[in-house]
Image (cartoon, rainbow, N blue to C red):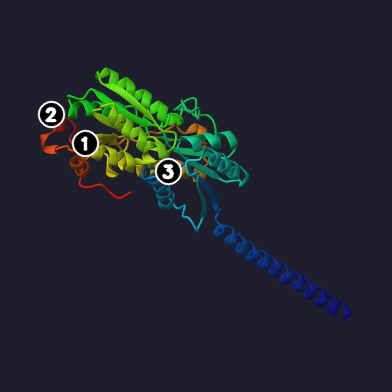
Amino acid sequence: MVKKKRLAAILLAAMMLLLAACGGQGASKQAGETEQKTGAGTEKKFKVGISQYVEHPALDAAREGFIKALKENGLEEGKNIEIDYQNAQADPTNTNTIAQKFAAGKKDLILAIATPNAQAMLQNVKDTPILFTAVSDPVGAKLVDNLEKPGKNITGFSDTPPDAIPNTMEAIKDFFPQAKNVGIIYNSGEANSVANVKVAKEALGKLQLTPVEATATNTSEVKQAAESLVGKKVDAIYVPQDNTAVTALKSIVAVANKSKIPLFVGELESVRGGGFAGVGFEYSDIGYDTGLMAVKILKDGAKPGDLAVGYPNKLNLAINKEAAKAQGIDIEKLPKEAMDKWNPQLIEKTEAK
């Protein structure tokens, strides 16, 4: 009898241990599932810094295109990405300050809009992936050594396709066959502008047109530079992709309108802003393409040094009809051969900038 009681007690204890073990396993499994669910629901929040040289329509459009590309690929501000936007207000000191701030802030990726900002970022940020956009000459600015294989922690999109500037110079000759002197307004302190002007001068020389330069070190000098070209009897004025000149484009437009001189510009935003004509592309497009590069880096783990520098691939010539009238140009009387050759996009009026 005693043996039977002892056996029953042993069996009861064994059953209790078994139940406890099963319960523990169930609890552990439940806890594990909860932890797994929590882990799956926790998405990394990326920190992206955007450094822009100055506010003007082209650079603003590039920034907006970049953010649009992120959003359309699942990286949305306020959800899984935090964007720190800083504007240098065309001050080189500010570009360095922003770069140092981003370097200390441990960003996951940095976008530099325009050459001075890209140069400052590369100098101060050594490990974080850097993308640039709206940079005219990445090699000349010493951002990359090789366009196909940048090799460093930086790559991006240039805003100067090889044919854009020569095509614009050719359009000047086609639309105004009697032209001899072409004025160029730019800031000689901007590396991108120096590169653009060099290409423009070479193209003008081949067309037997004479370049006449007028430089401005800041926006307050731009109007005076434009007026000096009027005194030199230029037949057309060209404004390249120069941040200083484009920021003060209104003052150049005013001079061109008053003096009845056709104003050619380096990008479509400036055509909309009052330029007569220009060969270009939408800055929102290269901003968007730069954003796609950012997606590859942030989501797929791509290395900037392995991504080739890109160029816009959709170029066209645009003419601003309202600007043409203000500058004394009758579009109906432009050479038919030129109109047929270029088949320009006609912009109805100047947009307020």
Query: Could you say where residue 301 lies in the image, as x and y percent from the top left?
Result: 52, 41
Query: Could you say where residue 274 lies in the image, as x and y percent from the top left?
Result: 27, 42
**Outermost residue toward the right in this view:** 2
Residue at point 39% right, 35% down?
242
Label 1 SS: loop
Residue 109 visible here: yes
Label 3 SS: helix
Residue at point 66% right, 67% down?
26
Question: Quarter of the image holding residue 209?
Answer: top left
Mark 3 or 2: the one toward you: 2
The kind of residue tagged 1 is Lys
* Mark 2 crowdedness (10 Å alpha carbons): few <14, some 14-19, many ≥20: few
Cα separation between marks 2 and 1: 23 Å
**Outermost residue toward the bottom in this view:** 1
Residue position for label 1:
260
Residue 164 visible here: no
Between 290 and 43, the one nearer to me in the picture:
290
Q: Is 318 left or right of 308, judged from the image as shown? A: left
Between 350 and 298, the one nearer to me in the picture:
350
Between 312 and 11, the one nearer to me in the picture:
312
Which mark is drawn over residue 292?
A: 3
Query: Could you say where residue 341 lies in the image, as x and y percent from the top left?
Result: 17, 30
Cα separation between marks 3 and 2: 39 Å
Q: Is 136 left or right of 42, judged from the image as shown? A: left
* Mark 1 crowdedness (10 Å alpha carbons): few <14, some 14-19, many ≥20: some
**Outermost residue toward the front in this view:** 231
Q: Earlier in the sequence, mark 2 or mark 1?
A: 1
Which mark is drawn over residue 337?
A: 2
Q: Earlier in the sequence, mark 3 or mark 1?
A: 1
